[in-house]
Amino acid sequence: MKILKNNSLKNTLSISSYSKVQEIDINDWNSVYSGSNIYLSLPYLESLETSLSQSVSFRYLILYDDKKKPAGIFSFQILDFIDKGISDAGTFCSISNKIKSKLISGDGIKVLLCGSAFSCGENGFEFKDKATEKKFNQDLPEIIESIGKFDEVTKNASLFLIKEFWQETKLPVIALSSGKYLKFNIDVNMILNIDSSWKSFEDYLESMTTKFRTKAKSVFNRSENLITKIFNASEIKKHAVEIEKLYAEVLDNADFTFGELNARTFENLKTKLGKEFFFDGYFLNENLVGFKAGIIHNGILDANYVGFNYKINKELGLYQRMLYDFIDSGIKNKCSEVRFGRTAEELKSSLGAEPVDMTLLLKHRNFISNHVIKPFIKAVAPSEFSLRRPFKAAYYKQLT
C-alpha cells in the first residue's frame, strides 16, 4: 500500500494505492462499494488480476475524507493500446484514422485506464453516496491523475483514459472536461429493452413483424445441428486451448486490442462470481466451435464475450444464433435489458437492440501533446449504420 498525504485536493486527507486486490483493506473498500456495479466488486477485479497480470498492470485507490472515512474507490488498468491496422470495427472502441497517427505507433502506447477494457459502462469509480460524490466531484481530475505519481509503471503511461459514461451522467464529465480532459463519443452500445410481457423467447418472437420473425427462425433452422452446453469452471479449464483459439479469431478481426482475456480469466470469473457469470459452449459433431459468456447482475445481462470459428459462423450463422440465445437467457432470468456492447450494430438492431451513446474522456500527460491532439479527438464520431426496427408498433409505442 502506498499513501499520498496532504495533497492539493480540497476535501481529502489521503489516498491509498494498491497494486493487488489482496492488499486492499476489504472493509474500507466494501464500505463504499454499493453492490450495484459488479465490475467494481473485489471478486471480479481479482479474477482479472490473477489471470492477466503478465500483460496488464492493475491499481486500486481508496479515497479518504478529512475524517479518515472511506469516501471513494477507483479501479485502474495500465496496458498497451495497439493499432493493428485492420479496417473492421474495433472490439473495444473505434477511433477514426485521423487520430491513429497522432496517438499510436505500431508498437502501441501505454494507457492508464480508469474503468475496464473488458466491459462497457461506468466501471471506473464509485463514491460512498450522492453527497460524497458531489463533494469530491470537482477533484476528480486530480484524484485520477494522482495514481500516476505512485510508481514507475503508472508514471510511464502517456495517456489517461476514462471509459465510459452514459449520456445522462453529467457531473463527472463536466469536472473532467474542466481538467483538460478531451470528451468524445465512440461507437454506440447496442441495448435491447426486454418487454415485461415477454415470459418466453416465443413471446419475443411474437412481438416481431413477420419479416424479422421469419429471419430469426431461419437462423435457428440453419444452426439446428449445434449443441449448446453450460460450462462450469472445470469444463472451461478442460477446453482452455479451444476457447483461446476461438477467442483469438474474434480479436484478430478487431481494429485495436486493449488487452486480451484468456481461458483462465473465464475460469476465475466462473469460480468467483458463480451464477452471475455464465459460459456456454457451442458444439458441432462433438467439436467446440464457439462460446458466449457474460454477466447477469442487478437485472442486466451484459453480453460481454464471444468466440467462434469463422468458417462455421459463415455456414451456420453461429454468431447470430448466439445473440438470440443471449436474449433467451435475458428473458429467462427476468432481466430488464440485454447490453450487447459495440460492433455489428446493424445486425444487433435487427434483433431489436437500440443504439445508446457512450462518452469517453482522454488526456495526454504532456500539455503540448494534449493540445495537438484536441482537434483530432473532436473529430472522432460513432460509426454510421442502418438502424433496423424489427418489432410491431406496440413495442416502440410503450418505449416513448
Image (spheres, rainbow, N blue to C red):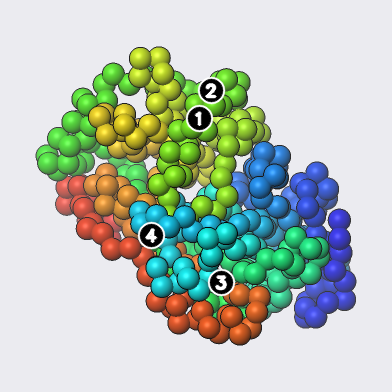
- The x and y percentages for residue 32 are 72, 56
Q: CA distance from mark 3 to mark 2?
A: 38 Å
**Residues at marks 1 and 3, CA–CA distance in whole angstroms:** 33 Å
Q: In this figure, which residue is indicated by the disc labeled 1? A: 243
Relative side of 29 to 385, left or right? right
Q: Report x, y in % for residue 343.
A: 37, 52
Q: Amino acid at mark 2?
A: His
**Which of the two discs, 2 and 4, sits closer to the camera?**
2
Q: CA distance from mark 4 to mark 3?
A: 18 Å
Q: Residue at x 32, y 50 (%)?
A: 344
Task: Sort mark 3 into few (<14), some (14-19) or many (20+) by Cα contacts within 10 Å.
Answer: many
**Between disc 4 and disc 1, whose residue precedes?**
4
Tags 4 and 3 touching, CB below 8 Å: no
Mark 2 neighbour class, 10 Å CA radius: few under 14, some 14 to 19, many 20 or more: some
Q: Secondary structure at mark 1?
A: helix
- Image quadrant where residue 147 sits: bottom right
Measure the C-alpha gap from mark 1 to mark 2: 6 Å
Q: In the image, what residue type sits under mark 1?
A: Ile
Discs 1/3, front: 1
Q: Check residue 188 in the rendering and tell me which mark sits there, or answer none.
A: 4
Task: Please name the residue shown 53% across and 66% down the image.
Answer: 104
